[in-house]
Image (cartoon, coloured by chain):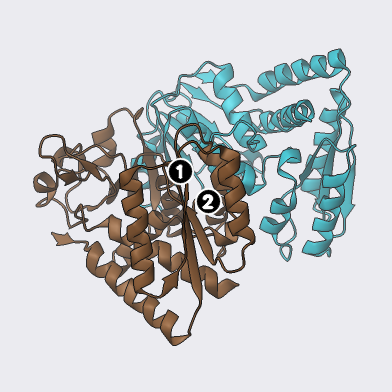
Chain colours: A brown, B cyan
Amino acid sequence: MIILDGKITSQKILESLKQEITGKNLQINLDIVLVGDDPASLKYVELKQKVADSIGIGGQIHKLSKDSTTNQVISLINKLNDDNSVTGLMVQLPLPTPIDTNKVLFSIKPSKDADGLNPINLALLFQKEKIGIPSATSLGIMKLLEEYKIDISGKNAVIIGRSPDVSLPLFAQLMAKDCTVTICHSYTQNLSQITSQADILISAIGKPKFLDAEFVKKNAVVIDVGYATDPETGKTSGDFNFEAIKEKVNYITPVPGGVGPMTVASLLFNTVEISKRI
Amino acid sequence: MIILDGKITSQKILESLKQEITGKNLQINLDIVLVGDDPASLKYVELKQKVADSIGIGGQIHKLSKDSTTNQVISLINKLNDDNSVTGLMVQLPLPTPIDTNKVLFSIKPSKDADGLNPINLALLFQKEKIGIPSATSLGIMKLLEEYKIDISGKNAVIIGRSPDVSLPLFAQLMAKDCTVTICHSYTQNLSQITSQADILISAIGKPKFLDAEFVKKNAVVIDVGYATDPETGKTSGDFNFEAIKEKVNYITPVPGGVGPMTVASLLFNTVEISKRI
């Protein structure tokens, strides 16, 4: 079994971005919109800004109160869309419940959408248009598969979870690389029967250790997007029971240290790409 | 085995649309853009206009020469987008090769996109936004499943073919109805192994009689979007070998008389929906 190491791989990507930014003296700003005072979101946003800063990307965090309306969030985004000093921008999800997340994501200028969450970018991905910006998580997973030279063409890929921010762009990207792709979800009947035929199995449901050996094909590639606190141990855990499947699979992402750091690096990769298109 | 009769079902839809149009005295125009002189496309466009006319929908066919540029097509579409007398519009596909089909489809005003082929409508479908207009073929298939009261929630649906005009919107619509959905294509390994597990099997590849009994699960629902001339018989044939599978499956669409008439009825259904939103 080989660990798909997101820490090392993301460091390589960040190092290469840093060299490019320094070498070409690129002036890049990634602005982040944070609504509400969820401590986990704040921590995550600060981490993103810190990593951005470490490779020479600037930008501001814009905090809005948790009582903000959809229109207030969109009006801030419109300002950033029009601000030439802002290279890319992103809105930290989840947004407080009364806010219409779809409307907010649609309001991000597609060409500045560093996190790749405007549905127009999803449509562009499905059209295989090069200007389509993939979601950071989806891109991070593709870059991890690429780094470890995993051959995916024609392979059977199964994604558990149907979130528009991870599963749908990943579906588009895997299909563009000629995978046969299936999306499973909470209504799927005989889940383990389907997942145990997957050459590449990705889960993004946030249920700690939900998936054990019976769900996994021998020699599979396992990508764990889950990230939640295991109520039994109090520790962060992915959707897969790592200990139970590690001897059965060929490749697996750890949690933490797998998809997480790849997502941050890919957000910044997207931002640098955007800066080169302008 | 029960035939999913697209002729009868589409007639019911058309009859109901006609009553609504007459009853409410709706003034509706569907304009169609045809580029080039492909006889099959011309015939299909004339059929659409004839059926539209029969239920009280007007509209013009706009013919452009096969040498038209992408910009010339888009400039016609922009005119129709802005013309208040045009309720909905569509571009007959395929377009002659030098024309950038994606660009043309993106130029159709999403709210007037009667054929549901602007990728923005695909993105809206994936977001489960009610304003998303499904592609006519995809909607036709969903309406056929609905008419025959086929329970699809949680079922395993497999689509063969990855075209953006049929397979992707159908994927979105089936997933929204809680199907587990797989897309297979020319790179898929072990195709029959995957398709023979499908409760609902849809094919849209245009290879006459390509799929026989080994590809089909017992008691499956089979939807045949294929429509091509069988070189052996010279007759129109679907992707499935109808005779070879008819005793094995529970439901099947004939070709012709299955998905085809449903597509035309759904195009007009979309047009009437658009008229009610204005």
Q: Quadrant of the C terminus of chain A?
A: bottom right
Q: Chain of mark 1?
A: A
Q: Nearer the viewer, residue A106 or B166?
A: A106
Q: Earlier in the sequence, mark 1 or mark 2?
A: 2
Residue drawn at (32%, 77%) of the image: A15
In the picture of the structure, the residue carrying the numbered disc 2 is A122
Q: In the displayed structure, does residue B153 sit left or right of residue B28? A: left
Query: Considering only vertical position in the picture, is A258 above or below B171?
Result: below
Q: In the displayed structure, does residue B72 sit left or right of residue A166? A: right
Q: Nearer the viewer, residue A118 or A176?
A: A118
Does residue B216 appear anywhere in the picture? Answer: yes
Identify the secondary structure beneath mark 2: helix
Q: Position of residue B137 (x, y in %)?
A: 64, 36
| Few, some or many residues within 10 Å of mark 2 (<14, 14–19, 20+) | many
Residue drawn at (66%, 56%) of the image: B102
* Residue type beneath disc 2: Leu
Q: Position of residue A133 (x, y in %)?
A: 51, 60
* Residue type beneath disc 1: Pro
Q: Nearer the viewer, residue A136 or A168?
A: A136
Query: Considering only vertical position in the picture, is B80 above or below A89?
Result: above
Image quadrant assignment for residue B141: top right
Residue drawn at (54%, 75%) of the image: A276
Does residue B169 appear anywhere in the picture? Answer: no
Query: Considering only vertical position in the picture, is B206 above or below B248?
Result: below
Q: Nearer the viewer, residue B46 or B75?
A: B75
Query: Considering only vertical position in the picture, is A40 above or below B48?
Result: below
CA–CA distance in space, label 1 to label 2: 9 Å
Q: Position of residue B25 (x, y in %)?
A: 89, 18
Q: Chain of mark 2?
A: A
Image quadrant assignment for residue B15: top right
Marker disc for residue A164: 1
Contact check, label 1 and label 2, Cβ < 8 Å: yes
